[in-house]
Image (cartoon, rainbow, N blue to C red):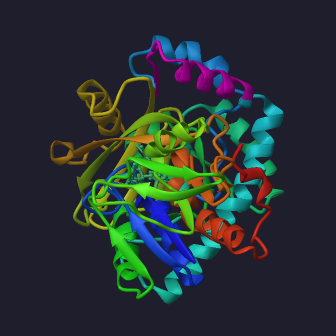
Amino acid sequence: MRVCVIGAGVVGVTSAYFLARQGYEVTLVDGQRGPGEETSYANGGQLSYSYVAPLAGPGVLSSVPAWLLRDDSPLRFRPRLDPHQWKWCLQFALACRASVSRRVTAEMLTLSYLSRDVLHALLEQEPLSFSHLRNGKLIVYRSHALLEKARALVEYQASHGAEQQVLNAAQTLDMEPALAGMRAHLAGAVYTPGEEVGDCLRFTEGLFERLSRQHNVRTLMGTPVSGLRRSGARIVAARTPAGDIEADAYVVAAGMGSRGLLRPLGQDLPIYGLKGYSLSVPVNNDEAAGPAISVTDYERRIVYAPIGQVLRMAAMVDIGGGPGIDEARIALLKRQVGDTFPALPLEAAQPWAGLRPATPSGKPWIGPSRAACNLWMNVGHGALGFTLACGSAALLTAQMAGIQAPIEPRPFLPG
Ligand SMILES: Cc1cc2nc3c(=O)[nH]c(=O)nc-3n(C[C@H](O)[C@H](O)[C@H](O)COP(=O)(O)OP(=O)(O)OC[C@H]3O[C@@H](n4cnc5c(N)ncnc54)[C@H](O)[C@@H]3O)c2cc1C
């Protein structure tokens, strides 16, 4: 069977890889010149298996007014005359109910733990080089009240298999001495030993390179798909400037481009681009400059990941600001990072901005589209696409092949 996968970000490349391994003839097509050039390019680098609680949570709506009034807020909302934005925000508000958020967290944990297992098995067969490290994660808190709230979440997550410990300030500094700059404000941290980091772009490129060498795979970069042609109940072609791509099945894994491909077919995906920023700073083995453990500054919502010779910091959710780098947001991020890690050479930081392809609930959509009987989706991974890519690809492949799915697929079925 011939499968055309549209999108060569981390989600599309992993999908193409597992479909090719299943024995399909795969064509992987992307509008960019190489794989991973959009949101998978310079993300936070976290393989954050235990931290998959959605952005939509019970405390979020009450925090929004305060965040909106502050210049240094991790969340910025620019209202637009865009019904899609308002509809998405309304659905997001509904997903903030405690019962929904808890259920989504439990479902996401099944997918993230599957992803971890699938990635580890993959790396035994394909030893990819992407600065992959199992260095654990510290979520650090300034507020004692928030640390106590986190303790309750740790207890809840323990019932779903997460292994975590709550640390006081002294224990946190023992574990990560580079946090000394925060000493005066530090309440403590939650430590999760099993968390990992890696370079998402290098992972995507490495897997793409392996994939390209396989006899049953064709890769077409620099080839934007302008639309999908439907005849009766089936998609019969993906239209590109280089001609039509004909296949027996089509997978849309086009990140932010997915909505534009599905809408003309009558399926309006609830995917909105939540803009975030990253800085990449060379650290060159200077242990005092930045953390060796992956760190999340909870109150400021900044994640820090040591990725090889670089410290990658990622932060912020801008709703409705358009693509591209906002220099004021980068300046704010540099100030906040400089407060915590004053020895970092921030003048050498490489800034980047990307759009997280987010659904209101935070769950990706993995499975058949209702727009055509041979059309599939692997979309909407929001803030967790690197973490969830391998599990999502395995789940999609099992559904397409009609074999036993590795986890319950229903929570992730489109719509
Ligand atoms: C600031 C920031 C930090 C993040 N940090 C983390 C993190 O620490 N851990 C984590 O797990 N996730 C993180 N994420 C989220 C993660 O980066 C995304 O979820 C993931 O990259 C999405 O992958 P994707 O393959 O779906 O989309 P993309 O990487 O955007 O790939 C989609 C591809 O489809 C192609 N495409 C689109 N339309 C078409 C078309 N019509 N024709 C042909 N090709 C098309 C694009 O060119 C692109 O290559 C972060 C995101 C941001 C913005």
Is 347 magenta? The answer is no
Residue sitting at 59 percent across and 55 percent down?
377
Residue sitting at 48 percent across and 33 percent down?
185
For residue 403, above or below residue 42:
below
For residue 330, above or below residue 281:
above
Bounds of the magenta segment: 74-94
**Where does the image place residue 258, in percent across and percent down from the top left?**
49, 46
Q: In this view, does 92 lie to the left or right of 68?
A: right
Looking at the figure, which quarter contains the N terminus?
A: bottom right
In the foreground, 410 or 196 = 410
Find residue 86 and report its image quarter.
top right
Residue sitting at 50 percent across and 82 percent down?
123
**Where does the image place residue 63, in percent across and percent down from the top left?**
61, 20
- Farthest residue to the front: give it: 232
**Where does the image place residue 291, in percent across and percent down from the top left?**
39, 56
The tally of labels here is 0
In the foreground, 299 or 324 = 324
Residue sitting at 52 percent across and 87 percent down?
124
For residue 132, above or below residue 324:
below
Q: Is residue 221 left or right of residue 11?
A: left
For residue 382, above or below residue 96:
below
In the foreground, 109 or 385 = 385
Residue 46 shows up from this direction: no
Looking at the figure, which quarter contains the C terminus?
A: top right
Find residue 234 and report its image quarter.
bottom right
